[in-house]
Structure formats: structure tokens, C-alpha cells
Image: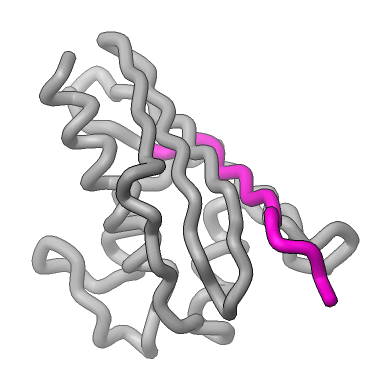
Amino acid sequence: MADDCVELRALNFKTFRAEEGGGGETQIDGQSWEEFLQDVLADEFQIVRSKVGAPHQKQNKAAMVEWIKTHPRGSVRIHEPEVVSWCSETMGVVTCTVTFNDKDYQNVKVFTKQSQGKWQCVYWQVTQLTPDK
């Protein structure tokens, strides 16, 4: 299971990289960012972003991919010492703090292991830690 936690930490990093989008040029493991997300996000995936009331606050898999296509964002800085992962044989959770546009955000991602042994993200929650000025 320790290897699974290492794999989940890597997937956590790669999902942030894929979220950068970049008009298709961002590559993760030889796939476009969109192909990567289609593979790693579960069909029932949900993300809840930090901005309450924003039209894009709650997104399913298709909505998130479409959002990234039209709103590619710059990179985030992951606070590596604060990355925490827990996993069992079939479920895993990764939490981390990131900095984006001079604000800190707490991210929690829940993964399930599919029957073929592949991890998929089923839920992603983002909470803004730095108050708006």
C-alpha cells in the first residue's frame, strides 16, 4: 500500500499539471492534458472549487474538461512538505496546500482503485485559505 500512496501523490501532482491545460500542448505521461483527465477522472467525478456561487464552482468531469479548455490557468506551487496521503487497497485520499495567484488553497482529492488496478479521482474539494483583500 505504500507504493499506492506514492502513486497517488504523483497523480495529485499530475492533476494540477493537467489543470493548466494550455491549448492542448501540456503533456502528461505521453498524453494530452485532456486525454490524461479523461483517463484519471472517474465518470462520477465531482470538483467543488473555492469560489462560492461562481458558475463553475461545482463541476462534473465533462464540465471541468470544458472549463480548462477555455480557462487554462497558470501553474500552482504545491507545498510539498504539507502533502499528506492515506490509502487502503481500494481507496485513497491526498491533501495538500497550493499557492495560486498569491493565495493559498487547501485541496482534498479522493481516489478509488478500479478493478484493473488503476486509480481514478472521484472527488476534489478546494478551499481558499488566504482571505480576499
Residue 112, image x, y percentages: 38, 24
Q: Is residue 96 left or right of residue 125?
A: left
Whether residue 51 is in magenta: the answer is no
Whether residue 131 is in magenta: the answer is yes
Q: Which region is colored magenta?
A: 121-133
Picture colour scheme: one colour
Q: Nearer the viewer, residue 72 or 108?
A: 108
Q: Residue at horizontal 55%, vertical 59%?
A: 62
Q: Nearer the viewer, residue 53 or 117?
A: 53
Count of numbered marks: 0
Q: Is residue 99 left or right of residue 1?
A: right
Q: Nearer the viewer, residue 98 or 12?
A: 98
Q: Residue at horizontal 72%, vertical 57%?
A: 50
Task: Please tell me in which quadrant of the rendered image residue 66 appears.
Answer: bottom right
Q: Is residue 48 above or below residue 76?
A: above
Name the magenta segment's main secondary structure: strand
Q: Is residue 93 left or right of residue 113?
A: right
Task: Please tell me in which quadrant of the rendered image residue 52 appears.
Answer: bottom right
Residue 85, image x, y percentages: 35, 28
Residue situated furthest right in the rendering: 53
Q: Is residue 36 above or below residue 5?
A: below
Residue 80, image x, y percentages: 31, 50
Residue situated furthest top in the rendering: 89
Query: Dividing the image into 4 quarters, which one contains the N terminus?
Result: top left
Q: Is residue 119 above or below residue 64?
A: above
Q: Is residue 67 above or below residue 50?
A: below
Q: Residue at horizontal 63%, vertical 50%?
A: 126
Q: Residue at horizontal 41%, vertical 46%?
A: 41
Residue 129, image x, y percentages: 69, 54
Query: Dividing the image into 4 quarters, which one contains the C terminus?
Result: bottom right
